[in-house]
Amino acid sequence: MTTRANELLSRRQGSSLVLTLNRPEARNALTGHLIRAIGDAVIEAENDPEIRAIVLTASGDRAFCAGMDLRSFAEGGDIGTGDDPATTAYYRLTRGETAMPAIGAVNGVAIGGGLELLLGCDLIVATAEARFGLPEAKRGLFPGGGGTGIGTRIPLSAALEMTLTGEFLSAQRAFDLGLVNAVVAADDLVATALDYAGRVGSCAPLSLAACKELVRLAVTDPSQVTERLSHWQSVVFTSEDAIEGATAFMQKRQPRWKGR
């Protein structure tokens, strides 16, 4: 059985930070401690200019994350609320507001808060055995951690079906609906996610931040796009990296990004 000290495993892989939820005996369910550990890792990544992407996966083959740890919740345990920096960073991740792209690698069921965590990822890779669900209504709850925003990633009819019935999507249907970017064999899961991370990380950091925010806003809050577009135009098009990108293209070499 894992201890609190190793409920989240973290390792560097090139320019990516790979985070592994490590409570397989509890289907990687979320506790307050695990939520803060993820948040701390997000802060670490955002403060490290060498990290260009986060890859989020989980131990075991049964579950990516079963959502809230209901046993802990029923016993009145810590379920990860508060305004401390780590908790705040975790919920920024679930809202897709991290400074760098995040890629989910799903090796089993992702339900409730586990799926809400994935909705903060910009790309999702899954095994054929993965399943996705928001079953809160069956338990007298609702997806209060951002799951009701599932309609920004899949068609409205499918989003309503998921939330109103509480039933699961297969990996293939999730792919067909556009929730998942690729369905791969289990042995290829993390390698595929890292391949995406490498391709993402080869792009300029400021460009990535602009694309990530503006593409999401175009779906979630179009009224903000014009203002934020103006901001990012002034930041990106006058940056050192913009000059470096053009120079590297002319010199037929790989650009050396500085993030400014």
Image (cartoon, helix red, strand yellow):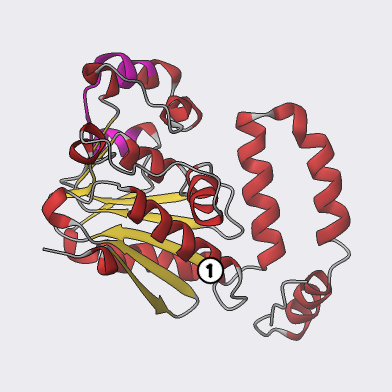
Q: Is residue 2 left or right of residue 174?
A: left
- Residue drawn where x is 14% and y is 59% of the image: 60
Residue 163 lies in magenta, yes or no?
yes
Q: Quadrant of the C terminus?
A: bottom right
Provide the residue designation for mark 1.
Answer: 45
Q: Quadrant of residue 111?
A: top left
In the image, residue 177 lies at what x, y percent? 37, 31
The span shown in magenta is 160-176
Q: Is residue 40 left or right of residue 172?
A: right
- Residue drawn where x is 61% and y is 31% of the image: 219
154 relative to 126, above or below:
above
Q: Quadrant of residue 135?
A: top left
Neighbour class for label 1 at 10 Å: few (<14), some, many (≥20)?
A: many
In the image, residue 63 lies at what x, y percent? 18, 48
The foreground one among 64 and 160 is 64
236 relative to 68, above or below:
below
- Residue drawn where x is 62% and y is 68% of the image: 203
92 relative to 174, above or below:
below
Secondary structure beneath dot 1 equals helix
In the image, residue 205 lies at what x, y percent? 66, 66
How many marks the image carries: the answer is 1
Q: Amino acid at mark 1?
A: Ala
The extreme front residue here reads 76
Residue 32 lies in magenta, yes or no?
no
Q: Quadrant of the N terminus?
A: bottom left
- Residue drawn where x is 65% and y is 82% of the image: 254
